[in-house]
Image: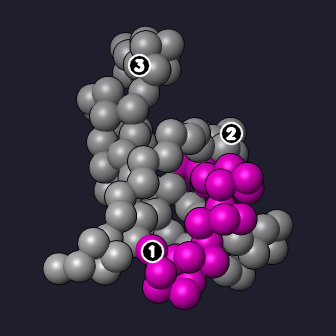
């Protein structure tokens, strides 16, 4: 395969916004997990919205920040990029999840 035709991998560290609107969403029982990223072209607040879900589309954790989705969503829509995501909880978030389970 030619170098210019080889797919590139870009790692972007970001966060999930709007968690307070999805407080009932189940988080993984571990400190990391794979997430589903779903484009929400019809989102009334942001036509570039990308929703982050754990396990299934109905278990919404929140969205990628607008500063990220404004660049990523056109690439996804055009089929010029694929996106995968993984969640890593901070130590503080992990402790909070442990308290809520107790």
Stretch of the chain drawn in magenta: 60-81
Does dot 2 land on a helix, a strand or a loop?
A: helix
The reply to whether the magenta stretch includes residue 72 is yes
Could you tell me if the residues under marks 1 and 3 are in contact, i.e. CB atoms within 8 Å?
Answer: no
Residue holding disc 1: 81
| Residue at left offset 50%, top offset 56% | 52
Q: Is residue 38 above or below residue 59?
A: below
| Residue at left offset 78%, top offset 68% | 46
User: Considering depth in this image, is 77 or 19 the residue closer to the camera?
Assistant: 77
Mark 1–mark 3 distance (CA, rounded to whole Å): 31 Å
Q: Is residue 30 left or right of residue 49?
A: left
Which of the labelled discs sits on residue 94, or is there none?
3
Q: How is the image coloured?
A: one colour
Q: Which quarter of the rendered picture does the N terminus lie within? A: bottom left
When asked about the image quadrant of residue 91, the answer is: top left
Does dot 3 land on a helix, a strand or a loop?
A: helix
Mark 2–mark 3 distance (CA, rounded to whole Å): 17 Å
When asked about the image quadrant of residue 8, the answer is: bottom left
Q: Residues within 10 Å of mark 1 (few under 14, many from 20)?
A: some
Residue holding disc 2: 20
């Amino acid at each position: 395969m030619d170098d210019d035709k080889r797919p590139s991998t870009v790692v972007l560290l970001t966060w999930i916004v709007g968690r307070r609107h999805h407080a009932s969403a189940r988080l993984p029982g571990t400190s990391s997990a794979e997430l589903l990223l779903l484009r929400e072209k019809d989102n009334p607040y942001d036509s570039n919205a990308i929703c982050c879900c754990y396990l299934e589309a109905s278990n919404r954790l929140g969205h990628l920040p607008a500063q990220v989705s404004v660049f990523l969503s056109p690439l996804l829509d055009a089929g010029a990029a694929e996106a995968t995501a993984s969640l890593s909880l901070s130590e503080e978030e992990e402790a909070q999840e442990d308290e809520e389970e107790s």
